[in-house]
């Protein structure tokens, strides 16, 4: 199985089809802190398990980039109020 991580969808598709595999027109997405949005993370597990064979169809997993979080609005709050509101929502702050 060719390694297609960090390739564009087009480059990954070419590499896989050159190896005798088909690539599904549907893809999966996943968040990644290390692989840029729109870039291939890898391929999905084979249905039923077992080794890949020539002419099998693979599904690409494409990066959605890092997971995004909503940041609470702290405009108009004092520094201490803003820090507390951020802390209550799982953020750390420094100043």
Image: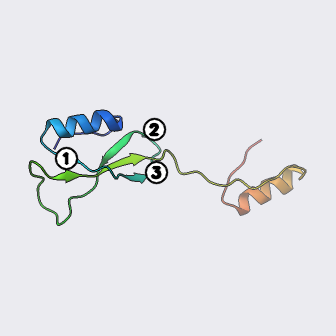
Q: What element carries label 3?
A: loop
Marks 2/3: CA distance? 9 Å
Image x and y of residue 69, in percent: 62, 54
The disc at residue 80 is none
Q: Dot 2 surroundings within 10 Å: few (below 14), some, or many (20 or more)? A: some
- Tell me if 91 is positioned left or right of 84 in this view: left
Q: How is the image coloured?
A: rainbow
Marks 1/3: CA distance? 24 Å
Determine whether label 2 and label 1 are within 8 Å by CB: no
- Tell me if 34 is positioned left or right of 67 in this view: left
Marks 2/1: CA distance? 24 Å
Q: Dot 1 surroundings within 10 Å: few (below 14), some, or many (20 or more)? A: some
Residue 7 is drawn in which quadrant? Answer: top left
Residue at 85 percent of width and 57 percent of height: 81
The disc at residue 22 is 1
Residue at 39 percent of width and 46 percent of height: 62
Which residue appears farthest toward the bottom when viewing the image? 48
Q: Name the residue under label 2.
A: 36
Nearest to viewer (mark 2 / mark 1): 1
């Amino acid at each position: 199985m060719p390694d297609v991580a960090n390739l564009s969808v087009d480059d990954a598709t070419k590499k896989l089809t050159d190896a005798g595999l088909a690539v599904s027109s549907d893809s999966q997405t996943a968040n990644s802190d290390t692989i840029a949005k729109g870039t291939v993370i890898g391929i999905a597990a084979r249905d039923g398990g077992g080794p890949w064979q020539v002419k099998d169809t693979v599904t690409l997993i494409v990066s959605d980039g890092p997971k995004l979080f909503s940041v609470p609005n702290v405009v108009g709050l004092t520094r201490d109020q803003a820090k507390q509101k951020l802390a209550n929502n799982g953020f750390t702050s420094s100043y």
